[in-house]
Amino acid sequence: MSLPGPQPTLFDAAKALLARDLKLLWRRRGDAAQPILFALLVVALFALALGGNPQLLQRVAAAVLWLAVLLAGLLSLDTLFRGDAEDGSLEQWLLSPVPLPWLVAVRVFSHWLTTAFPLVLVSPLLAELMQLPHPQLPVLVASLALGTPLLSLLGAVVAALTVGMRRSGILLALLVLPLYVPVLVFGAGAVAASAQGFDASGGLLLLAAGLVVSLLLAPLTAAAAIRIANS
Amino acid sequence: MRRRRGRETPSLRNAGGNGRPRPPARCGADGNAYNVAPDAPACLRSHPRTEAPDPMTATPNPPPLLDARGLRFTRNDDPVFGPLDLHVDAGEALLVQGGNGAGKTTLLRVLAGLLRADEGTIRIDGRPAGAGERSRYIAYLGHLPALKQDLGTLENLHVLCGLQGRRLRQMPGNALAIVGLAGYEDTLVRQLSAGQKKRLSLARLWLSPAPVWLLDEPYANLDLDGINLVNRMISAHLRSGGATLVTTHGAYAAPPVRNRTLTLGTAAEATA
């Protein structure tokens, strides 16, 4: 009786998906810069609207920077599974011997790496635009480094839920923004706390705890949602 | 099958080509037209349990590679097909025929594990197999190509091999040559024609380690040469102990291998 041949390992599948996404990013280098440009514009618009008052800018800097990053992530969230659903790649994920939650986790990681991580890297520049005091910069970068993967994982669940719809558009935002509230509160709150001279570690630790929990649960939930959307 | 449908009772809708109540007869004992494989029995069997053992296999009565019993699928309380019994042995092709909307694609998606059947059991090699277990044994070629437009042909094959595994001693480069895409290794998929994309999907299928192929309209978009290619691939796959389900609109291009036919009727045809 014919048995199946060599099966793909978790490592093979992760390597193939990551290589694919990085190659695609390189082929469309122009698109890759869009989240950064968007966040830059949002911050610039806030700075212009607030009238260049350094004290006022400093006071709202943490909130504006966090919102700019959050909105940039929201705009790229729909591309997380949409392309793969339209060309049938998701179908092959479902049919792969590799567990679907693992593939989802790898895809969320590569999406975070290509859309959110560049924002974390340029956040010192954005902070400079908002006149954020330099002692608060490490707290801001740490809160973004912990918070943006959490945003990606929470967003993945909602993106998976809406992947079966032809055009999710504003519905995706309506569903995901309430889930983002705690992340925003603790992320921006940690920076605000350090601005007032308090210890910022409480908010950061809560973000880290949320990240650990969602690392475990979000891929499972998103995979279940993809199965529903595909049937 | 078509002759039998005339005697069906109008109340029975679309029972997979035969309208009898359960347990239905084994499917497709009448598709004998392309039986040219040298090792095939002279007449195709209506009752596999009483058949002579296949001379190619050592064990006297091997279980079918893929065996589905009482398979039924409804969409929004509308029956799509079933209850339906079907089985495919190693070295055999089952042609799934039927008009548009007869449920051919749905049947293949249920067997592949993309859709969940309302009733019925599916066995692989005689063992009950859930969707996760089946994924190791089944390669599915559907309407969606699963190809990335901005990647080259070889890059796409490497990605898909990472997901599905790779047959022993088969390399993506060789697979491209087999499907007639030699020289297109670095061509982006967006620059390929529809037929060439289909050939690339066939290369992916060729690399799959799974013994059961579910092919949904594999002849679509292909020229005569491509149709011959599909038939040659199916023949080679069956010779190596695999099995294939192929959906076609009609018998215009059946592979020249030991095969049987399963005819799905639409609800309208069944009640006509």
Image (tube, coloured by chain):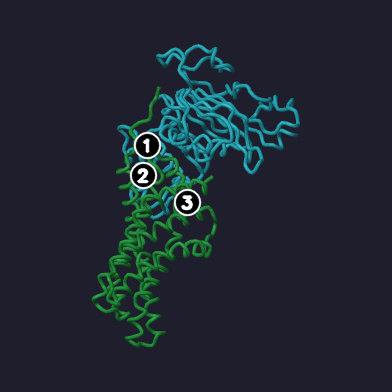
Chain colours: A green, B cyan
Q: Which residue is mark 2?
A: B157
Instruction: Determine if residue A50 is in view.
Output: yes
Q: Chain of mark 1?
A: B
Residue B71, image quadrant: top right
The mark closer to the camera, 2 or 3, is 3
Could you tell me residue A13's position as x and y percent? 34, 44
Of the residues shown, which amino acid type is indicated by label 1? Leu
Distance from disc 2 to disc 1, alpha carbons, whole Å, reads: 9 Å
Q: Which mark is residue A85?
A: 3
User: Which structural element holds mark 2?
Assistant: helix
Above or below, A40 against A221 in this view is below
The residue sitting at 31% across, 64% down in the picture is A204
> Disc 1 on helix, strand or loop?
helix
Check whether the beta carbons of the residues at disc 2 and disc 3 lie within 8 A of each other: no
* Residue linked to disc 1: B207
Foreground: B213 or B137?
B137
Up-down: is A122 above or below B120? Answer: below
